[in-house]
Amino acid sequence: MMLKILALLLLFVFGCASSVFACTSFALYGNDIFYGMNFDFTFLPLKFWIESNSGMKIFHLAFLYEPYPKEPKSKAYFATTCGMNDKGLFSACQEVEPYIEGFEKPSDDQIHIDDQYETISIYSDVEKVQEFISKKQAVQNLGPSLHNLFADTKGNAFVSETDNTENIIVGMDHDFLVMANFANHSLVGKHYEEAVGVGAERYKIAHDYLSKNKNDFNVEKGLELLGMVYCQDPGCSTLCSMVFHPRTNSIYIALNLNFERVWKVSLGEGVLETHRGYDEYSQIHLGSGGILSAELELLGN
C-alpha cells in the first residue's frame, strides 16, 4: 500500500502544474463489444504483462514509478492502470480534475479509490464490482484525484468516483460510456456537449464518433478513434493506445500514436504477436514478467 501511495505522489509532482496524466477510455455495446484507452503521460517506461489468479488471466498496462531521493528504502515498481481479464471485465483508472484532498491511510470502513482497479483480478462482471464498492466508502489517495471506468460483456458499464463522503456511480445513458479527466457525474442530466473541464473536447469527440459508428464498430475504428482523442496538453504525450475485444480475448496495442504498427495480445493463450506494419512476424509468451514498451518496439525491427 505504501508503494501505491508513493506512486500517486509521483503523479502529483508531474501533474500539479498541468494535466500531464490525461488519458481517455471508453466502453461500447453496438454490433459488438469493444473497450479502449489512450494512456497519456510525460515520457516514462510502460510494461505489458499477464497475471494469473485462481485460473483467471488478467492483462495489465502498468507504468514505472521511481521513488523519491528522500525515500531511499523504496524500490521502483510498475503501477497498473488499465486492463481486462479473460472473463471480459475491463477497468481503466485515470486522473480526474479538479483534485480534492486525499488521505494517506484510509480508515477501516474506507478504501482508496485506486484500489478498486484490483477487482479485475478477482471478479468476472460489473455486478460483483459494484457489490465490492458498496461495502466501503471510497476516498481519494494522496496526489491527483482518480476515477475508474468498469465494463463487462453483459452490457454493463459505469464510472466510479468519490468526493470522500459518497460513492458516486455514473452509468450509461447510451450504448456506450466515455471517461476523460473531468468528473462524469458533473454531466448527469445534461447534454454531452455541455461537458467542461480537462478532457472535455476529447470526451465530445469520442461521444460523437461512438454514436455515429456503434453499429459497425471494429478494431480499426477503435484505433481510429483513439488517434482522434490523443493528448494535446503541454508536456504530455499519448504513449500507448489499446483496443480491447473481450469476445475474442484480444487486445490491440499501438505505441506513440503509430497506428501503422500494431501488436496483438491473445489473452487466453498468453501470446503477444505482431499484427500489422512489421516486416517480420514476431511472437512472445507474455507472462508475469511482462515486456517493456521499448523492448516491444525493438522486437518488430
Image: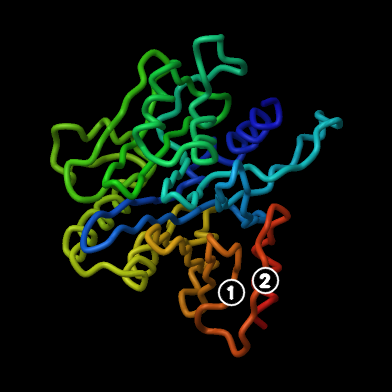
Label 1: element kind = strand
- Display coloring: rainbow
- As helix, strand or loop, the secondary structure at mark 2 comes to strand
- Name of the residue lying farthest toward the top: 108
Residue 272 percent coordinates (x, y): 60, 69
Q: Residue at x 37, y 28 (%)?
A: 130
Residue receiving disc 2: 284
- In the rendered image of this protein, does residue 289 appear above or below residue 228? above
- The residue depicted at 70 percent of the width and 31 percent of the height is 3
The residue type indicated by label 1 comes to Glu
Name the outermost residue toward the bottom: 279
Which image quarter is the N terminus in? top right
Q: Position of residue 246 (x, y in %)?
A: 40, 57
Q: Are marks 1 and 2 in contact (CB under 8 Å)?
A: yes
**Residue 52 appears at what percent x and percent y?**
62, 48
Q: CA distance from mark 1 to mark 2?
A: 6 Å
The residue to which callout 1 is attached is 273
Closest to the observer, 20 or 33: 33
Relative image position of residue 294 (x, y in whole percent): 68, 66
Which amino acid, mark 2?
Ile
